[in-house]
Amino acid sequence: MAVLVSRSSKEKAKDTFREIFQKFNFVPRGQVFIKPNFSGRPPVISGENTDPDLLKILIETLLENGAAKVFVGHGALLGTQDKIFPFEKIIKDGGFDFLNNLKNTELLDLDKEEKELVEFKGFSFLIPKRLREFNSYINFSKLKTHMETTVTLSLKNQMGLVSMADRVQMHRNKLEECIAYLGKLIIPTLSIVDGIISMEGNGPHHGRPKELNLLFGGNDMVEIDSVIAYLIGIDFKSINHISIANKLGVGKYPGEERLKELDSFKIKDFKLAEKYEKFGKNIYAWPTTACSRCITAINESGKIIKKHPFKYFKVIRRIFLGNKKINVVIGKADNLKLPKNEKIICIGNCAKCFSDKNGLKTIDKCPPTVKEALEHIKREIEK
């Protein structure tokens, strides 16, 4: 087991992919499945998705080196009843519709695939039954920070394989344990991480693109994710899902000597994720463990407020000119502590325990609609 780290670019990517194949004795044969990261919602930020050009180059490299057919699979993204992100839309908005026209390539909507239940020590997931049919599986993730899980790399990328209902439940119940246990049940033939353009700051959706010109390859998700965390300045043993996956035997931490060999690839000043996202002068949004449904409700509410400043004048005035901090809390927030003298607005069913504990009101729905979230935020801010 080892990790290949390579200074690369779109122009050099094909050679890098071949180098990864050779390093890990991977010979493409038959049907190859790729799970990329298509998690970006419009407008998609550079660094948010697996790069479309790199995905195309990887497919070409696989076909040129022996694969008979390549399958690229993903599902729709979580949203609300009044703001959805169907599979066809994320493909088009992310610039991946070219996949429909590539020779010997098939794009799969994983939500439409027949599922089977897989279980390990009390953790169970519905995954596409078809995964068993492929000759090999490449986990092609993006190098991004994550406000809830510190990073999203190869282990976290596999969440996109499970059903939408499972994704919601993972966020509701021990998210990082679920990620680790999923890694025990589904093991890629190869993991490749796209770090040509990464995302720093408040990833996976509110960060900033950062050009690194790096590609990573390996056959051990724990090791490759640990190496990347180390290179961007994080103690990988402190990242819960990596630590749990290591204990479960999903993979192994890299050795100290190997890490020292990679010190020349260390990235200076890579901005890590905060636990909150700040809007204007006074709004602090705390996602804690929330899934993208409640996050969508808040994001879309903010867009509407910004689009209609006269209609929401009082709200905007308090956001930008008020003297009081306004905290918007979603997710379970079990360990979140906020000063009692600050305004706290809770949204969603997951936040109910937190709201009850602090004598607050929440919208007890999973998820609330954008309209419901907007009305609740407006009402609470204008009090």
Image (tube, helix red, strand yellow):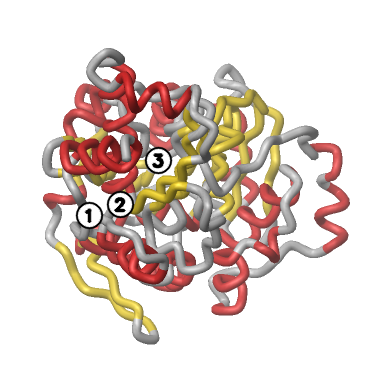
In front of the other: 322 or 160: 322
Q: Looking at the image, which residue sits at the far bottom? A: 121
Pointers 1 and 2 in contact (CB under 8 A)?
yes
Q: Quadrant of residue 185?
A: bottom left
Expressed as whole percent of the image width and height from the top left, the position of residue 355 reads 35, 63
- Residue 71 seen in this snapshot: no
Q: Residues within 10 Å of mark 2 (few under 14, many from 20)?
A: many
Amino acid carrying mark 2 in the image: Ile
348 relative position to 12: left or right: left
As displayed, is residue 165 above or below residue 273?
Answer: below
Amino acid carrying mark 3 in the image: Asn
Residue at the spot of label 3 = 37
Image disc number at residue 363 = 1
Residue at the spot of label 2 = 347
Instruction: Tell me the CA gap for discs 3 and 2.
Output: 27 Å
Tell me the element at label 3: loop
Q: Earlier in the sequence, mark 1 or mark 3?
A: 3
